[in-house]
Amino acid sequence: MQPTMGTQQSSLVKEKVTMKKRSLSRWTETVRPYAYIMPALLFFCLFFFFPIGYMIYLSFHDWSLLDLSAMEWVGLANFQEIMLDSDFHLVVINTIIYTFGTVAISLVLSFFLALWLNRQAKIYGIMQAAVFSPHIISLVSVSMLWMWLMDPQYGLLNAILEFFGFPAYTWLADTSSALLSLILVSVWKGVGYNTIVFIAGLQSIPKDIYEAASLDRAGKLRTLAKITLPMLSPTLFFLTIINLISSFQVFDTIYIMTQGGPVNSTNMLVFYIYEQGMDFYNGGIASAASVVLLGLIGVMTFLHFWFAERRVHYR
Amino acid sequence: MAQVVLKSLVKDYNKQNVVKGIDIVIPDGSFSVLVGPSGCGKSTTLRMIAGLEKVTKGEIWIGNQLVNDLAPGKRDLAMVFQNYALYPTMNVFDNIAFGLRNRGVSKKECKVLVEEISEIVGLTEYLTRMPSQLSGGQRQRVALARAMVKKPKVFLMDEPLSNLDAKLRNQMRVELTGLHKRLGTTFIYVTHDQVEAMTMGDQIIVMDQGTVQQAASPIQLYKEPDNQFVAQFIGSPAMNILSGFQQRLLVGFRPESAKIAGVNQEAPLSDRAQFMKRGNILSREILGSDVLYYVESGQEKLVVKDDLRYLLQEGQEVIVSVNEEDLYLFDQESGIRLRQGINLKEKQKLAGGMT
C-alpha cells in the first residue's frame, strides 16, 4: 500500500526530531567531559596559570608596589639588568651551592641513618622519633634556636669547641662560614623527614630478595649497591625532587638568621626577589628574577625526570 | 650432590617451640618433600637448611660438612622461593648471572652459562626483559634458572608452584620432576599440598606441629600410615575416621576403598565386606569419572568415592561396606595406628559394623 501525503509528512517530522535529538546528545557527549573538569580547570587557571602568566607579564615592565599605575613596558631590560648584575650572579651561585650542599648532605646522611634505624627494637623507634622531631618544629623557632647555638660569644657550639680546646668558629658572622652554617641548619631540619621516608622505602623491599641475595653470595656492600639502592630509586627520586625545590626556595632561614648577609654571602634567589620587590620597590627586577627561578627549577625538574626515566625502577 | 641430615633440630621463636627436635635423613639425589598443614614447621626447617634461620639446637649436615654456622651463600645450595624473589631492578640475564658474578665467574663464562640454562628452561627470548614484564610461569622459570645455573649440591624449594594457576602448576610439576631426573641433584621441596607431594616426591616427610609424623615413599604413606594424622592428611578426599565400638579406638577407611549401594537395590557390595554402615546420602559431587557421596550415618558423616555406573540419588538410604583389609584402626588418644594383635573378627567388632 502506498503511504499517503499525511503519513509521509509526519514521518519526515519524526525523522527531523530524532536527528535533532541525536545531534543534541552528540553535543552533550562532547561537552560533558569538559564540564566535569571545568571547576578544577578554573581553580588551576585562577590560582596557578594566571599568577605565573601575570608574573611573566610583569617581568617585562618597570613597576613598583608604591605606584602600580605607573607601569612601563621595558621589554627584556629587566632580564638584561639582572644578567649584568654581579650581585645577582652571587645570589644564583649562593643558591646553587646551598641547594646542592643541603640536598647532597641531607640525602646521604638520612640514607645511612635510615639504614641504621631500620630495625625492630624499641630503641630504634625512639631514635626515629627523635630524628624526625626537628621536622615538626616551626622554621622560625629552629632559626632562633640555631642563632643562639651559633652565637660567636654566647653560643653553645663555640662553648663546646672551646671546651675541647678548639678555636671559636665564626659561624654566621663571617662571609666564608655563613652559607655553610645555613646549610647545617637546613640539613638538621630536613634530615628527619628524609630518614623516615627512606625507612618507609626500605621496609617496602621484600625480605626474600635479601635472602635470595645472601644465597647468591652477595656481600653487604654489593647488596647495598645492587639491591637496596636500585630498589630505593623511586624514594630517592622523590626526595631529591622535593628537597631540590624546597632548597631553591629557601627564604625564612635567611630572613631570620642573616638577612642575606654578611655582605650578600647568604643572599639567595627568593630573598633577593623579596628584597627587590619589598625593600627596593623594584617590581620589574623582582619579577624577572622570579622568572629565572621558575626557569631554573623547571630545567632541573626536567633533567631529573629525564635521568629518572633511565635510572628509577618502579616495581 | 649431597645427602642432607638433620639431627635433633630445634627452632624456637620468642620461647615458642616451632620445630621440636626433628631427625631426618634426605638421601643423596632424592626428591624429598616436606609436607604438612600451615604452621607445622616445614618452611622453618627448609629455611634452617638454607641458613636463613638460626638453628636453636641440633645439627644440619650437608654432605660431610656441619653447616650450622656457615653463611647461606657458602652452603652450596640454591633456593626457589614462593614469590620467586627475583631482583626486580635487574633483567632476566642479570637475575640469573648475579650469583655467578658474586662467585667471581668471568663475564665470558657467565654469558655462556646463562645462555645455556636459558635454553634449557626456555627463556632465551626473554633475557633482556625485566621481571615485571614476565608472566607467572616465566618468572618461575627465571627463579629455576637462577638456582640451576649455580650447579648447587642441593635444591631447596619453598612452595614454588603455589602462585601459579592450576594448569600451569600441573605442567610445572611434570617439568620439575623431569628436571630432577636430569640433574640427579638432591631436591628438598616444601608444600602444603599433598597431591603435589604425592606426585613429585620419592620420599615424603609429613610434618605436624613441629614434629615429623612419618617419612616414607608416597605409596607407603598412602597404604601404611603410621598414625591418624598421616592417614587423614594423605589422600584426597581424606580418610573416613569413625569412632569404634570401644571408646579407645577409631576405625578408618579410604573413601575410594568403600562400596556403596541403595538398601533396596541389588547391591554391588563386595562379598568379602566385613564392615557395613547404613545411612542416607546428604549430597553428592560428580567429578567426571567419579562421584563423591557424603553419607550421614547416625551421628557420623562419611565420604565414599564411587564410579558413575550406579548413580545414587541425594536422600537415598544406602549401605556402605568396606573390606577387612582396607580398614585401619587407631588409638583414640595417641592417634597411633594399631597394626598387630587384632584379628578380623575383633576388627569387625571394634568397628561396630553391622552384619
Image: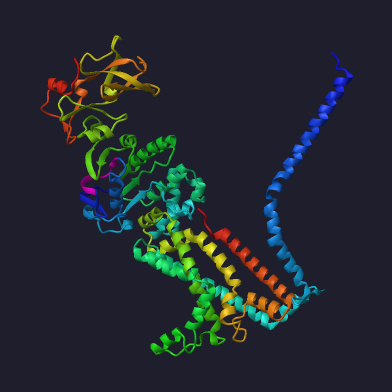
Q: Residue A92: x percent and y percent?
A: 64, 77
Question: Residue drawn at (51%, 88%), measured in percent from left and top?
Answer: A170
The residue lying furthest to the right in this view is: A5
Q: Residue B108: x percent and y percent?
A: 45, 57
Task: Give the side of residue A300 with respect to residue B294, left or right.
Answer: right
Question: Residue drawn at (43%, 69%), measured in percent from left and top?
Answer: A131
Which residue is more in the foreground, A137 or B82? A137
Task: Give the side of residue A8 with respect to residue B263, left or right.
Answer: right
Q: Residue B3: x percent and y percent?
A: 24, 47
Q: Magenta: predominant secondary structure element?
A: strand
The image quadrant where one finds the C terminus of chain B is top left
Q: Is residue B291 visible?
A: no
Task: Give the side of residue A71 with respect to residue A193, left or right.
Answer: right
Image quadrant of residue B98?
bottom left
Which residue is more in the foreground, A115 or B148? A115
The way the protein has been coloured in the rendering is: rainbow
The residue lying furthest to the left in this view is: B341
Q: Which residues are magenta?
A: B19-36
Task: Give the side of residue A42 with respect to residue B313, left or right.
Answer: right
Q: Residue A132: x percent and y percent?
A: 45, 68
Decide: is A96 above or below B64.
below
* The stretch drawn in magenta includes residue A8: no
Decide: is B37 above or below B76.
above
Q: Is residue B325 visible?
A: yes
Decide: is B231 above or below A49.
above
